[in-house]
Amino acid sequence: MQLDERGVFLLSQLGHHVAERMATSLMPLGLQPAHFGILSHLQADDGLTQQRLADNLGIHRNSMVGLVDDLEAHELVRRTRHPDDRRAYAVRLTDRARAVLREAEASADNLEDTVLAPLSEPERRRLIAMLHRVAAHAELLPGVHPGLQRRAPR
């Protein structure tokens, strides 16, 4: 069987291609894909503790501290004392982060439109539904890139 007849090869080939293009599209915004993932999760549930955010994303807490440090240095998040636990910090998006996220999401939308251009809208929905099934079978956390979880602690 030729490589281009293997689904796993095509998924890997496309995954690499899309990951590279996504990283390149985020560079002008000063973001890495891991930053985009964290900001996106905070957008859905702003004010999580660092520990809860790490748990939700399956990231080692030491790695999360480094990532939040990066985001804070770029004025995309701020840490405040958590209202219910004085020992914990809540991580909150800044106004700047919300603006950067809008640009990052537009960039991701453009990339998706480009990559999936050969497919009709019903085909796109079917592809995404099938990919959800395959990801669930692989026991991947929904909305969490496995590369983010593999980041080594600082």
Image (spheres, rainbow, N blue to C red):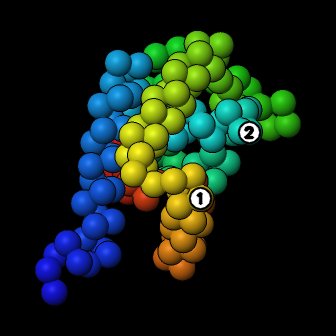
Q: Amino acid at mark 1?
A: Pro
Q: Which residue sits at x=29%, y=31%? A: 24
Tell me: 8 left or right of 116: left
Q: Does 148 sit above or below residue 72?
A: below
**Residue 132: x %, y % from top left:** 57, 67
The answer to whether residue 34 of the structure is visible from this angle is no
- Of residues 33 and 123, the one drawn nearer to the viewer in this rendering: 123
Quarter of the image where one finds residue 42: top right
Q: Which residue sits at x=35%, y=18%? A: 28
Q: Does 152 sit above or below residue 96?
A: below
Tell me: 66 left or right of 3: right
**Residue 113: x %, y % from top left:** 46, 40
Tell me: 3 left or right of 9: left
**Residue 44: x %, y % from top left:** 71, 39
Quarter of the image where one finds residue 41: top right
Q: Does 128 sit above or below residue 110?
A: below
Q: CA distance from mark 2 to mark 1?
A: 30 Å
Quarter of the image where one finds residue 13: bottom left
In this figure, which residue is indicated by the disc labeled 2? 45
Q: Which residue sits at x=46%, y=16%? A: 74
Question: Pointer 1: residues within 10 angstroms few (<14), some, or many (20+)?
Answer: few
In this figure, which residue is indicated by the disc labeled 1? 122
Q: Amino acid at mark 2?
A: Asp
Question: Pointer 2: residues within 10 angstroms few (<14), some, or many (20+)?
Answer: few
Q: Quadrant of the C terminus?
A: top left
Point out the residue furthest to the left here. Answer: 2
- Of residues 74 and 133, the one drawn nearer to the viewer in this rendering: 133
Badge 2 or badge 1: first in the primary sequence: 2
| Helix, strand or loop for disc 1 | helix
Q: Are marks 2 and 1 in contact (CB under 8 Å)?
A: no
